[in-house]
């Protein structure tokens, strides 16, 4: 494919020189590969081989024995350069990156590319950059088109490293290359995929395109863009928990989990992105301690990160709680108006926590509070969270009669309704009409609960009112909050099967009324299978029976969303 008009020339890096390559190849009697390596693979410096895969060398016709000889020679050649080379400064000592810095060999990890062939190093001419998608700390992200050797084109996102007057140096370069290094070995359906690296000037990462942009942009999109359905937010939360569990299992801490770094690959698929702050978890305690002052997202950070610069999977879990909060506030800024230096004080001294968003059910807020447990060991793991989410999943209902009453959530028969709040005793429930996306209260009699799909079915639990320490009215009105009961440590949560309520049968099945395929023996015992109104009485919206556990003794949610009248001057990122 031809270079796009106006795209940068594939210049070599300033200090590039290729005599070393010619000498090296001559010594190995592989000089015939000098041009292909230089021109097709864009390799101009020894460290560029870090990004060359066996398949790349296959592609230029180099046999595997020759590749092994080359790998050995490179090892020897580079051992002398190691101490002064900028890439080694970055990748050296970065444990999970060891694989990445291994010279090409048969054993290199492989990422399938869209046409099934691996190609991590991408020639500059194969990538055509288009519209600007956004810019971050490192540089700019453009929409692009990558032409594979087969001629097939793949839509991609191209992140280019901003190059200052002094060349590619400094922490931006470090973070950029670290991001490449980390992403090269990740393969998960909810982790943004790196296709490869262009070793031109500027350095470019060629990534999977998330055509729908960031979740934060979607959450804050102005009307007429409708808000996202609550059930979809829960689905995203589950996808993110899965991706984060995957990262944790690989010994990595993300450190920048936030809706701005969650990208929408499709309307129902979210991907965790932005791995610039990812670090390996070291030592027996599985923590990463920041070495010096760096920019970190204060308002998303756990207390131990703010106080000691300590990051771990548990601090990622804290950030997950903040991300949940962002989702249910429509992308509000956490701790808006609170200066960074006061956030830690609010968390520790005042034991404050972000308030429950009106759209967030008590069960989901309880889950967030657990993520915000003061002690990292008291927080759930991401694997726990996948299960906890299932339990906190808001029940789905269907409208059975038109609701037109003034002040009530309007609905028509058949409208799918996501239940945010309700009670067996109350005649009014609160929910979202998934047809209109409007949220409000409605007569309980207008909605019948339906069986959620198995993957999303909440596990019904008993023991209501162990909930939040701060009981609120149906709208999460903080004005009426009052302290309730003491927290429990992780693993102490009550887990009691739903008991018969109001004359309904005991149910361990979780079936809503009239579930098709419900067995006769089951039908006799299950209140959910009974016709209305008995079936309704037996249906306990999850959030009403879920125990709610505050994260820290005395944890106090603070004022209305994003409007805490504390201090002016919001600052998302600050120097620690
Ligand atoms: P920083 O890197 O400084 O934390 P950031 O996440 O905003 O900030 P980038 O990762 O450089 O910066 O991304 C800039 C913007 O480009 C993002 O906000 C996002 O909207 C867009 N973007 C990034 N990667 C992709 C992608 N793969 N597909 C679509 N859009 C993307």
Image (spheres, grey):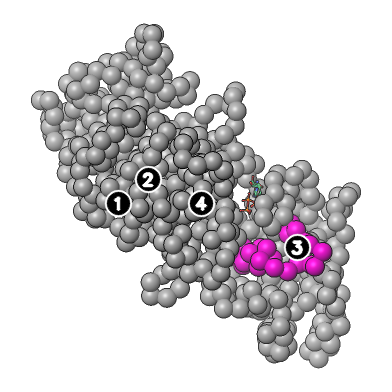
Which of the pair 342/161 is nearer the observer? Answer: 342
* Identity of the residue drawn at 22% across and 51% down: 488
Residue at the spot of label 4: 340
- Nearer to us of marks 1 and 4 is 4
* Identity of the residue drawn at 46% across and 54% down: 301
Residue at the spot of label 3: 203
* Identity of the residue drawn at 54% across and 61% down: 576
The answer to whether residue 288 shows anywhere in this view is yes
The answer to whether residue 264 shows anywhere in this view is no
In the image, residue 83 above or below residue 140:
below
**4 or 2: tag closer to the N-terminus:** 4
**1 or 4: tag closer to the N-terminus:** 4
Give the CA separation, mark 2 to mark 3. Answer: 41 Å
- The part of the image, by quadrant, that contains residue 97 is bottom right
Residue range corresponding to the magenta coloring: 160-182
The circle drawn on residue 353 is 2
Report if the beta carbon of the residue with label 1 is closer than 8 angstroms to ligand 1. no
167 falls in the magenta region: yes
The residue carrying pointer 4 sits among few (fewer than 14), some (14 to 19) or many (20 or more) residues within 10 Å by Cα, namely many
- Residue 29 rendering spot, x and y as whole percentages: 81, 88
* Helix, strand or loop status at disc 1: loop
Residue at the spot of label 1: 552
Give the CA separation, mark 3 to mark 4. Answer: 33 Å
Give the CA separation, mark 1 to mark 4. Answer: 21 Å
In the image, residue 29 above or below residue 96:
below
Q: Residue furthest front?
A: 567
Give the CA separation, mark 4 to mark 2. Answer: 15 Å
In the image, residue 360 above or below residue 162:
above
């Amino acid at each position: 494919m031809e270079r796009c008009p106006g795209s940068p020339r594939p210049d070599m890096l300033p200090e590039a020189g290729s005599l070393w390559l010619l000498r090296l190849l001559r010594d190995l009697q592989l000089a015939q590969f000098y041009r292909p390596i230089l021109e097709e693979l864009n390799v101009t410096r020894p460290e560029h081989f870090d990004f060359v895969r066996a398949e790349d060398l296959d592609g230029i016709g180099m046999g595997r024995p020759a590749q092994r000889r080359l790998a050995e020679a490179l090892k020897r050649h580079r051992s002398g350069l190691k101490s002064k080379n900028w890439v080694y400064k970055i990748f050296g000592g970065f444990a999970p990156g060891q694989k990445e810095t291994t010279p090409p060999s048969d054993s290199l990890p492989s990422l399938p590319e869209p046409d099934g062939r691996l190609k991590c190093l991408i020639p500059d001419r194969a990538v055509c950059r288009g519209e600007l998608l956004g810019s971050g700390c490192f540089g700019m992200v453009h929409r692009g088109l990558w032409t594979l050797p087969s001629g097939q084109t793949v839509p991609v996102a191209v992140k280019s490293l901003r190059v200052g007057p002094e060349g590619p140096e400094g922490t931006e370069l470090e973070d950029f290359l670290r991001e490449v290094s980390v992403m090269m070995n990740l393969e998960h359906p909810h982790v943004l995929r790196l296709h490869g690296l262009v070793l031109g000037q500027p350095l470019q990462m060629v990534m999977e395109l998330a055509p729908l942009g960031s979740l934060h942009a979607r959450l804050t999109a102005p009307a007429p863009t409708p808000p996202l359905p609550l059930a979809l937010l829960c689905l995203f939360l589950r996808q993110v928990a899965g991706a984060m569990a995957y990262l944790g299992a690989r010994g990595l801490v993300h450190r920048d989990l936030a809706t701005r770094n969650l990208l929408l690959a499709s309307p129902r698929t979210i991907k965790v992105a932005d791995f610039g702050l990812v670090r390996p978890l070291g030592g027996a305690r599985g923590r990463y301690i920041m070495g010096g002052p760096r920019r970190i997202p204060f308002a998303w950070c756990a207390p131990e990160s703010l106080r000691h610069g300590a990051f771990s999977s548990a601090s990622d879990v804290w950030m997950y709680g903040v991300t949940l909060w962002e989702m249910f506030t429509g992308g509000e800024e956490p701790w808006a108006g609170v200066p960074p230096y006061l956030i830690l004080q609010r968390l520790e001294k005042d034991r404050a926590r972000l308030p429950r968003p009106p759209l967030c059910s008590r069960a989901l807020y309880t889950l967030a509070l657990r993520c915000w447990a003061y002690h990292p060991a008291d927080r759930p793991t991401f694997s726990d969270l996948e299960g906890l989410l299932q339990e906190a999943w808001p029940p789905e209902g269907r409208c059975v009669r038109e609701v037109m009453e003034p002040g009530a959530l309007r609905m028509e028969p058949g409208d799918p309704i996501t239940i945010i709040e309700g009670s067996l005793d109350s005649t009014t429930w609160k929910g979202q009409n998934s047809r209109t996306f409007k949220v409000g209260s409605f007569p309980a009699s207008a909605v019948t609960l339906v069986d959620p799909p198995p993957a999303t079915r909440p596990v019904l639990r008993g023991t209501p009112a162990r909930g939040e320490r701060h009981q609120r009215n149906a709208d999460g009105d903080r004005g009426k909050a009052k302290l309730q009961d003491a927290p429990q440590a992780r693993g102490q949560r009550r887990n009691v099967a739903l008991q018969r309520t109001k004359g309904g049968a005991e149910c361990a099945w979780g079936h809503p009324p009239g579930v098709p395929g419900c067995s006769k023996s089951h039908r006799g015992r299950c209140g959910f299978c009974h016709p209305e109104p008995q079936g309704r009485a037996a249906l306990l919206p999850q959030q009403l029976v879920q125990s709610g556990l505050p994260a820290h003794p005395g944890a106090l949610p603070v004022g209305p969303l994003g409007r805490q009248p504390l201090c002016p001057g919001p600052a998302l990122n600050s120097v620690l």
